[in-house]
Amino acid sequence: MEMLDRWTFERRSHSYRVARLSLMIGENMGLSSRDLFVLGVGSLLHDIGKTRVPREILVKPDKLTEDEWVIMRCHPQLGGEILDRFPSLRFAREMVRQHQERWDGSGYPDGLSGNDVVKEARIFAVADSYDAMTNQRSYNTVKTAEEAIMDLSLQTGVLYDPEVVDHFLKLGNPAIFERKIRSDEDGLLEEIFPMEGFIGLFIEEP
């Protein structure tokens, strides 16, 4: 996680927030303990492929060129390849590779659609989009929780799995689950995933 922070200038809190929200949705859907573990670890490592993307593209304040987007869109595939190098992390490989796939097949890198996208990646897509809309990044205007929920609802069955969005909406009042997402980020994730430091050792291995 520290390596990703250094390379992308993105705080690890983004990965922690998305992991927490993904787990909340997954728990609401009744996922098994194993599936929740895959979901949590995959969420933490979803952008590890960005460590193979040129830094100047990652931090560019202006709109990316078409060629730069081609490179940026390689990061899920690169992330899957990184995890494939380590047998102990291969369980999260497909989720990381597919985290930018979309329900209607408009995502990347493989243009998968519907249930061909692993369920962990379908859950992650909703959590990640919500987080992207409600937090400041160089390329977006921050939306309120209510505006983000409306956008997600409008894209149900298009970009997002209807079942996942339904369970996301069942989390209830965003003011309540937002507090849970943002509270004690390090503490909760370290309790659920005590192996994070162990994962870091693998990722930083040459």
Image (spheres, rainbow, N blue to C red):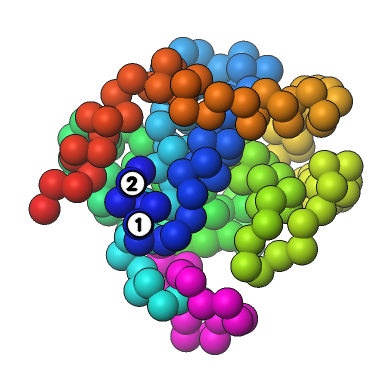
Between 162 and 174, the one nearer to me in the picture: 174
Examine the rendering and report whether any part of residue 158 can be seen. no
Q: Is residue 40 left or right of residue 122?
A: left
Q: How many marks?
A: 2
- Which of the 4 quarters of the picture holds residue 38? top left
Q: Which quarter of the rendering shows the N terminus? A: top left
Q: Report the residue at 62% width, 67% height from top.
A: 138
> Callout 1: 10 Å neighbours few (<14), some, many (20+)?
few
Q: Amino acid at mark 2?
A: Glu
Q: Is residue 166 magenta?
A: no
Residue 166 spot, x, y in % from top left: 79, 30
For numbered disc 1, what is the local secondary structure?
helix
Q: Amino acid at mark 1?
A: Arg
Q: Is residue 72 above or below residue 136?
A: below
Residue 170 spot, x, y in % from top left: 81, 23
Examine the rendering and report whether any part of residue 205 can be seen. yes
The residue under label 2 is: 2
The answer to whether the residues at label 2 and label 1 have Cβ atoms under 8 Å apart is yes
Determine which of the numbered discs, if any, sits on residue 173 in the image. Answer: none
The residue under label 1 is: 6
Q: Report the residue at 55% width, 45% height from top.
A: 14
Q: Report the residue at 74% width, 49% height from top.
A: 134
Q: Is residue 148 above or below residue 170?
A: below
Q: Which residues are magenta?
A: 58-75
Q: Is residue 60 magenta?
A: yes
Residue 16 spot, x, y in % from top left: 51, 36
Q: Report the residue at 57% width, 29% height from top.
A: 20
> Callout 2: 10 Å neighbours few (<14), some, many (20+)?
few
